[in-house]
Image (cartoon, rainbow, N blue to C red):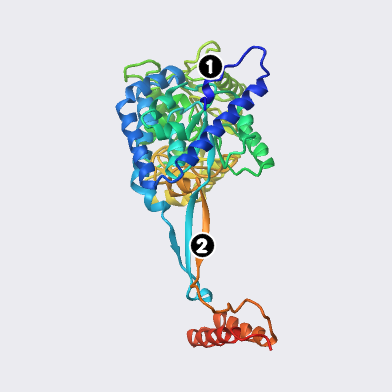
């Protein structure tokens, strides 16, 4: 069947009809491929992903160049975030997926004596993965690899703002099986809606909150399960006992990596009042040394922003903050005609400012002071979002205590954005940052359907809870329940006695 990307639009075509056709073909192709490869063992699927891993490693320079060109990342950002993280995930799957996907023996209670319990992890079918523009390679391969490892097929739609057209297909060409199981389609939100109408087994969406809400509403009409990884307004909390130099370096990278276009980057900086001035002065000096440039040879620190509408939001948030009394400690209001935005540091920020309570998604660090541990927690949790957070303190017990009180999905202690860096940990948020997990055992099993199996012996015995019901059976059940859940003295003996009497009585026919 013709790949969906080979269909060409005509000026007179009805756009909705065209998108419906692309969507239908993509799902038909994926379902056909899934039937053809449904008997592939987990070992065979992981072998295909191993081939993919080595292909990515061998062609990393090409991948980096495409991402830099389309997204605007600096070279080291692209290497570390798009390549290293992706290879790390593929390596984790090789080491762990087979064990995690094996049938699990589950403890069987004494009420089901003589029986065995199993839990199976089965493929969902054809899943729909919709990814954003900020990490176009890493996000795509992370979801695709998890889906393939668990026995699914994929229809994948990248963002229209940075589709890196042909890149995913190019690396998947290392394996005819992967080429068949993964269908890539290109288009905007209306194509995404048409894809949902094809009734995928599950939808995995990463992107903005408003778009996630629309996807969930449409999916609910078809009872399609969804996992949503949405925005964040992640706080970084710096206590007075934290080493200043490391905390400053962490804030700098956490706020400005990928030009601030990371949902788990630092969007709010909370510094203990007693060290605020010293911290901000050090932060400004460090920011002044950053090299901002895209298309570099590995010497730039911050690349350009990706899309104009996000730059415009940065301008709006910074101007709103300045109008409300914030102080611009570093940077300038961005040029509305350029995507190159120098890092911006604001202090004297208040909670009513948009830069503090809305997701900015740009290279902006707004700073507020806190006076106590409780105050820091209160300020950090005062948001609709709950994706990630960072806590810097020399007191490990305090850092853990604060981490436990934060309403987020992941916390890095004395580091920034690192809970996401471990492929063995689940990544996902709370509150309006979405639900469901990526990566880790929990994320991998999100691509499966659990099936409970209970195994009994073949024989002639009648179960105690089967018909006929009689007053005597009711009495025996009452005594058995009392033995099970009553006083512990002689409990096992009583359970055995009443259980055997109940079983023996159940073999008798009704008089």
Relative to residue 79, is residue 460 depicted above or below? below
- Closest to the observer, 320 or 203: 203
Instruction: Determine contact: label 2, label 1, CB under 8 Å.
Output: no
Q: Secondary structure at mark 1?
A: loop
State the image coordinates of residue 128 (x, y, percent, origin top left): 55, 36
As helix, strand or loop, the secondary structure at mark 2 comes to: strand
Q: CA distance from mark 2 to mark 1?
A: 61 Å
Q: Residue at x 46, y 52 (%)?
A: 401
Identify the disc placed on residue 256.
none
Residue 226 in view (yes/no)? yes
Find residue 479 and report its horizontal and vertical position in percent.
60, 86
Q: Where residue 333 is drawn, which disc sits there? A: 1
Label ID, residue 453: 2
Q: Quadrant of the C terminus?
A: bottom right
Q: Residue at x 40, y 23 (%)?
A: 287
Nearer to me, 414 or 259: 259
Whichever of labels 2 and 1 marks the residue nearer the N terminus, that label is 1
């Amino acid at each position: 069947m013709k790949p969906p990307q080979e269909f060409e639009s005509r000026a007179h075509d009805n756009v909705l009809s065209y998108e419906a056709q692309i969507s239908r073909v993509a799902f038909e192709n994926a379902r056909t491929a899934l039937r053809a490869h449904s008997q592939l063992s987990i070992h065979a699927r992981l072998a295909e992903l191993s081939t993919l891993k080595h292909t990515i490693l061998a062609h990393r320079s090409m991948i980096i160049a495409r991402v830099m060109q389309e997204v605007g990342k600096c070279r080291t950002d692209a290497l570390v975030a798009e390549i290293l993280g992706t290879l790390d995930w593929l390596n984790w799957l090789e080491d762990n997926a087979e064990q995690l996907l094996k049938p699990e023996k589950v403890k069987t209670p004494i009420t089901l004596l003589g029986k065995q319990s199993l839990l199976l992890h089965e493929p969902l079918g054809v899943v729909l993965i919709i990814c954003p523009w900020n990490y176009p390679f890493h996000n795509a391969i992370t979801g695709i690899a998890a889906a393939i490892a668990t026995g699914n097929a994929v229809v994948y739609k990248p963002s229209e703002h940075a589709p890196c057209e042909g890149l995913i297909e190019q690396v998947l060409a290392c394996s005819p099986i992967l080429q068949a199981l993964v269908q890539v389609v290109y288009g905007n939100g209306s194509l995404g809606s048409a894809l949902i109408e094809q009734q995928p087994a599950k939808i995995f969406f990463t992107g903005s909150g408003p778009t996630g809400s629309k996807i969930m509403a449409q999916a609910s009409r078809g009872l399609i399960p969804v996992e949503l990884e949405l925005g964040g307004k992640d706080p970084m909390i710096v206590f007075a006992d934290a080493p200043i130099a490391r905390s400053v370096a962490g804030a700098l990278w956490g706020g400005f990596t990928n030009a601030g276009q990371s949902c788990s980057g630092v969007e709010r900086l909370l510094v203990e009042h007693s060290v605020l001035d010293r911290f901000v002065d050090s932060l400004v000096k460090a920011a002044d040394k950053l090299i901002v440039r895209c298309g570099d040879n590995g010497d730039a620190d911050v690349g350009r922003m990706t899309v104009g509408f996000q730059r415009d939001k940065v301008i709006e948030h910074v101007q709103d903050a300045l109008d409300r009394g914030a102080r611009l400690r570093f940077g300038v209001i961005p040029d509305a005609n350029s995507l190159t935005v120098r890092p911006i540091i604001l202090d004297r920020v208040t909670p009513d400012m948009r830069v503090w309570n809305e997701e900015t998604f740009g290279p902006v660090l707004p700073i507020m002071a806190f006076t106590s541990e409780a105050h820091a927690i209160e300020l950090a949790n005062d948001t609709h979002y709950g994706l990630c957070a960072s806590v810097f303190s020399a007191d490990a017990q305090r850092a853990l205590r604060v981490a436990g009180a934060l309403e987020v999905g992941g916390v890095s202690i004395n580091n920034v954005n690192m809970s996401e860096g471990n492929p063995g940990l689940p990544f996902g948020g709370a509150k309006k940052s979405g639900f469901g997990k990526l990566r880790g055992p929990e994320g991998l099993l999100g691509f499966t359907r659990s099936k409970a199996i209970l195994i009994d012996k073949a024989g002639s015995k009648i179960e105690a809870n089967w018909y006929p019901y009689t007053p005597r059976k009711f009495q025996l059940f009452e005594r058995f329940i009392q033995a099970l859940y009553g006083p512990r003295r002689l409990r096992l003996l009583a359970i055995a006695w009443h259980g055997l009497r109940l079983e023996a009585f159940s073999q008798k026919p009704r008089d």
